[in-house]
Image (spheres, coloured by chain):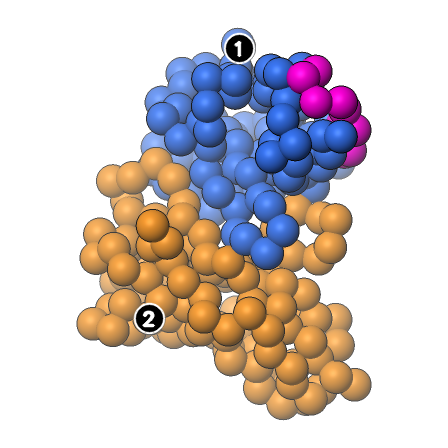
Amino acid sequence: DQQVKQNSPSLSVQEGRISILNCDYTNSMFDYFLWYKKYPAEGPTFLISISSIKDKNEDGRFTVFLNKSAKHLSLHIVPSQPGDSAVYFCAASAHTGNQFYFGTGTSLTVIP
Amino acid sequence: DTGVSQDPRHKITKRGQNVTFRCDPISEHNRLYWYRQTLGQGPEFLTYFQNEAQLEKSRLLSDRFSAERPKGSFSTLEIQRTEQGDSAMYLCASSLGLAAGELFFGEGSRLTVL
């Protein structure tokens, strides 16, 4: 049962443009969300988080938007850079829970 | 280096052998997690510890899998009688606090079962 879904396995964007990565979840108890970036042969690296009391969180070029009614979040990267090319995972947790549920990832390629 | 470290980074074994992976979390982190990741999938939760207590282990894939964190510091994940389906990346992560918080991952231990 996939509680966190990333329906786009891959995305290609031109350098300097905006990258938008999407994530949907099914469990209404989820109230804390993370985005991770993963390069091949490395562990995931934390990017940005958002809790359900907010609908937006920004950190430099990265912004995460949360739409609780739609159970949807998105990660915006602007401007996109070639070094952003990686697999991006979203993860969700309930504050009463003990684990994060991860999506299957979106492979982002930023074309120079 | 004060991040999460895992050892070995890569293990090749024959089917039926036992393997053990070690994870050293960030020193002040009280929570330690094990995840498994297979190709094309996201990390899949296996188990977690708060200090030395294993608070969730129902997601361990079978009774061939076991994990320990004897003194609330490093942890080991053992797989007995390995099968080819166990081939995957085993990820360890740690976090600080009583509730689920940001996870810091190690670089993973890749298991190949021949």
Chain B pictured colour = blue
- Quadrant including the N terminus of chain B: top right
Give me the residue at 63% from left, 73% from top: A108
- Quadrant including the C terminus of chain B: top right
Q: Chain of mark 1?
A: B
Residue placed under numbered mark 2 in the picture: A72
> Which residue range is magenta in the image?
B8-17
Give me the residue at 29% from left, 39% from top: A97
Q: Quadrant of residue A87?
A: bottom right
Question: Share a chain, discs 1 and 2?
Answer: no
In the image, taking residue A53 as reference, residue A46 lies left or right, namely right
What is the number of the mark on residue B71?
Answer: 1
Instruction: Say what secondary structure mark 1 lies in.
Output: loop
Number of residues whose C-alpha sits closer than 10 Å to that of mark 2, classed few (under 14), some (14–19) or many (20 or more): some
Give the CA distance from mark 1 to mark 2.
Answer: 40 Å
Position of A109 relative to B24 (above/below): below
* Amino acid residing under circle 2: His
Instruction: Say what secondary structure mark 2 lies in.
Output: strand
The reply to whether residue A60 is in sight is no
What percent of the width, then of the height, locates residue B81?
Answer: 62, 16
In the image, taking residue B69 as reference, residue B17 lies left or right, namely right
What percent of the width, then of the height, locates residue B52?
Answer: 45, 15
Give me the residue at 60% from left, 15% from top: B80
Q: State the residue in front, A112 or A105.
A: A105
Chain A pictured colour = orange
Tell me the mark number nearer the camera, choosing from 1 and 2.
Answer: 2
Please identify the dominant SS of the magenta region: loop
Q: Quadrant of residue A107?
A: bottom right
